[in-house]
Amino acid sequence: MKNTHRFLLFNGMFILLLVVGGLGQVRANDGSIYTQKPNDPEAFFFTPGKYNIKADGKTDVSASLQTAINELKRAKNFGILFIPEGKYLLTRTIQVPAAIRLIGYGKTRPEFVLGKNTPGYREQQNYMVWFTGGLVQEGREPADAGAGTFYSALSNIDFRIESGNPEAIAIRSHFAQHSFISHCIINIGEAKAGIYDVGNEIENVKFYGGQYGITSSRTSPGWPMMMVDTYFEGQRKAAILTREVGLTIVNMYAKNVPVVVEMQEDRVDRLFIENSFFENVSQAGIIVSKENNAFSQLNLLNVDCSNVPLLVKFAQSGKRAGVKEKLYKVQEFTYGLVMADMETPSRYETISKIAPLGTFPKKMAMDMVQLPAMNTWVNIRDLGAKGDGETDDTQVFQDAIAANKNIYVPQGWYRITRTLKMSPGTRLIGLHPFGTQFVLKESEAAFSGFGTPQPVVESSAGGDDIINGIGINTGAYNYRAVGLKWMASRHSLINDVKFVGGHGTMRKPDPANAQPPSRSGGNRGGGQVSSPSNPVSATGMDLAWDNQHWSLWVTDNGGGTLKDIWTASTYAANGFYVSNTSTPGRVYAMSLEHHVRNEARFENVSNWKMYAFQFEEESREGHDDQMVEISNSKNLMIAGMWMYRVIRVNTPKAFGVRIWNSENIDFRNVHNYTQILPVIEAPVYDVNKELPVYEWDFARLMVTGREKGRKVLTDRPGVVEKVATGFEFAAGATADSKGNVYFGENRMKRIYKVSAETGALSLLADYPWKPFTLTTDTRDNLLVIFRYDPQPGYMVNGVQETVSRLPDDNPMYSGWGNSGWAALAYSIDPDNPDQSMKPMPRVPTNQVTGVKKVVHPSSRWRGDFDKTVSSMPAYSFVAPDGVTIIPETYDLGRSTALTAVTPGQSQPVFIAKENDKTTVRLDVSPEGKLVNMKEVHPQGQYGNIVDGEGNLYIADGQIYVYNKDGREIKRIMVNERPISIAIGGKDKNTLYITTSTSLYKMKIK
């Protein structure tokens, strides 16, 4: 039994239910994570021998530490300064520039100490460590870290602020992607705070004392902030003070504080807390500053409380949500703009589900998967890997994986030439995702040309695998590349992984230049082949964009924890694709940006949660970008979702999240924004039900899947009805033997399916190939004709890959910039497209025996039409059934539909003669050729279809219907120009019509 209650005033209490909370087995880790000195030839080490220091907590090391950091930045531009165990006295602010990481090691963590009464920390706010945007020059004020500060971090180092420093703060960390603070104990004492201005994510950090543990304004890019496994105790004002931060918190323990989280007075904020613990909170668990504002969003889920009499205080109205029980569990407490489903009007409300608690945990459990003990690591360099970006290190890694579980990968760029396959339980451990990379050279043979997706790294199936602190660089031109294919268990981990390409790319230093280089700016036409560090562009666009498969592909019941991932390679089809899995998965702090067509896609997925899920659309590459596609999925939660369009965007955007045939999709704390006028029209949209959600910001939306929707289809014979819209030149319509209908979008590289069983539309495939037309073989495999452009730089037998000019090349078309590419074919099983996708072999036509189906273009536009339409090309593509062929003709690359025939069939065939705007009638020879041409109808443009009674439907501006005697019997008017037509549905009695923007249907009889 569950009860939902609206907001109650102070003198009211919540109805309570009995629940006993549980706790995991992994306890909080206060000890050193990195217990040994790493062997990393690219790193710097802050040792007494090199810097003439003493780690005794008494000798000031500030100048030496700053020198070491600056030397590292100048020498490497990005990298790691390792700090040995010991106590390091600081007397002034240490400034850490972008992409530099400070990592402690030793049996005990090193500790940075601010001594008693240190000058500069009494009268004005000051920091022990300040992350900056670049090197700080003498005599200049430091530039705070910002939206372009990437890869910075501090890990496995403790802090202690001694008395007499009331304005001291341990860390200022206003950085962006792939930056974090982790594995620290910050003893603030009498000082102000542990961290000021957070950025990206915090993991396993404990705060003791201080006015605040954290005091922060919004992150520098304005994106959500992720915190996991944090502990706060003894703060004098509040554990956390926020100013529009947008915190997403999992597994926080706050003890002996007056307030857990206070939203600063007169400031809105978005706060999500799950699986956390509040103990001995004297004033209020949460203080909400402003009410009845879409930006004020609060979600508490599964929070255990002990001695917290006032859970939430609303400062503006004075309302208070109190609980009389000493021990209780907050199953849910939601405040803000709420939608119970996609049809219920939004309203400001408070929802609470609170139950008494039997026991309260004595210790904090860890949520995160932990790295294995360092003494079990094997160094890949010791096994022979070079990491120089040129030597092929693939076999060294594969041998190491076969013999070892835990492999340390020091900084270096390790060239990979074929898929690196992990064994069950393999752990690949790096500590800097730009310093340590798996790299493909341009046009690496195993990843080039046309073929099935090939991952650079592939996990085991169902193993507890880990990949940590490693970048994956698929280059620019490697058509078949997938960055990482993940099939590992719910206990697996992907952490601190960068998919390199485009934004966030950094250069190594030029020895002739004393200053470290900035991020890559790109080369406008300076070379012939693109690479992430030297893109070739034309009219503002890199010619290599969107030519690879997905960067991160989780599939085949893969799951686990995915944390601190930046997937922004514009060369990939999308950044994050999850398919065919019910294994629980969790995403913590994922940044998805800068793709051409799509950022994230979920297909047949359940039991996943996404926290601090951030999207950014850029102006050059992203004006067609669909941020999220969710199809045939259920039981997903997205908490702390930011959808951002940069100020340079100048095009409207219809949808943020498109949903197809999905249920129980739980959105919490959603923010949709830009500085320009065209914000996303509908942040969430159900395609099949034509249901938009127009609220840009809200605390909660539940997509139940039970919404009826706005679309009303009568299914009356002869009535044309719109099924769905939002497409671009939808073409290639075809139907299989069951009545399922398929069509595609050429430029957007998508293929869709209409289910004969349910009538529902879904996204079937989004491979990086432009589909022209579709058909099926005798076993209902879907056959796709697509455009293939030879891969620049890909050498075949020592020569640049090219395609041959076909004997029936059409100079009316190919001579005007439409040459140099080919129309090729691949097949997929529609029930399992990604795993079944494969090229259709091209063979001599006369060598195929027992042919039962021959597929021709439905229209041709050429001066020699009469000759070509009756020819049989020398080569054909053979379908998986072995008896369906598609003869290779130039016109496959210019048609919008295909016509399938049975050799020797008695029924006539109709083809559009486009240059005369007529339709011709032909017979089918025993070989499947089209013969005995006769011009029969004065219309003909894109294609036609014949129904079960022999009636011919011709698409030419409208749809002309002729009976089998050749007499016009009807005209079907559509609100848009028909592009392709097919007859499908369960009873094969529905005419489907694709247009430039939409899909229509009409019941025939």
Image: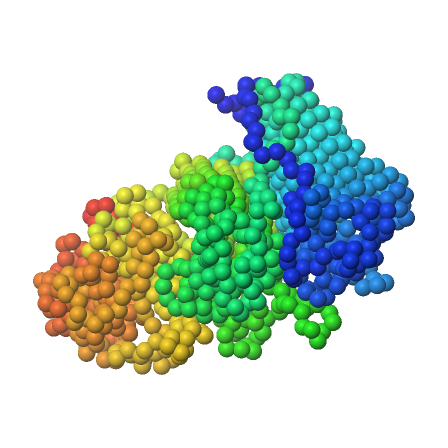
Residue 535 visible in rendering? yes
Q: Which of 820 and 385 is in front in this view?
A: 385
Q: Nearer the viewer, residue 364 or 950?
A: 364
Residue at the image position 64 percent from the left and 35 percent from the top = 28
* Total tally of numbered discs in the picture: 0
| Residue 174 percent coordinates (x, y) | 71, 51
| Rendered view: 620 above or below 751 | below
Residue at the image position 57 percent from the left and 55 percent from the top = 379
Q: Nearer the viewer, residue 297 or 144?
A: 144
Judge from the rendering whether residue 907 lies leftward or rightward of residue 193; answer left or right: left
Q: Quadrant of residue 319?
A: top right
Residue 287 visible in rendering? no
The chosen color scheme is rainbow
Judge from the rendering whether residue 790 lies leftward or rightward of residue 299; answer left or right: left
Q: In which quarter of the image is residue 116?
A: top right
| Rendered view: 114 above or below 932 | above
| Residue 810 percent coordinates (x, y) | 29, 79
Residue at the image position 66 percent from the left and 28 percent from the top = 278
Q: In which quarter of the image is residue 139?
A: bottom right
| Residue 286 percent coordinates (x, y) | 68, 32
Residue at the image position 49 percent from the left and 70 percent from the top = 442
| Residue 42 percent coordinates (x, y) | 65, 62
Judge from the rendering whether residue 186 lies leftward or rightward of residue 422; answer left or right: right
Judge from the rendering whether residue 843 lies leftward or rightward of residue 255; answer left or right: left
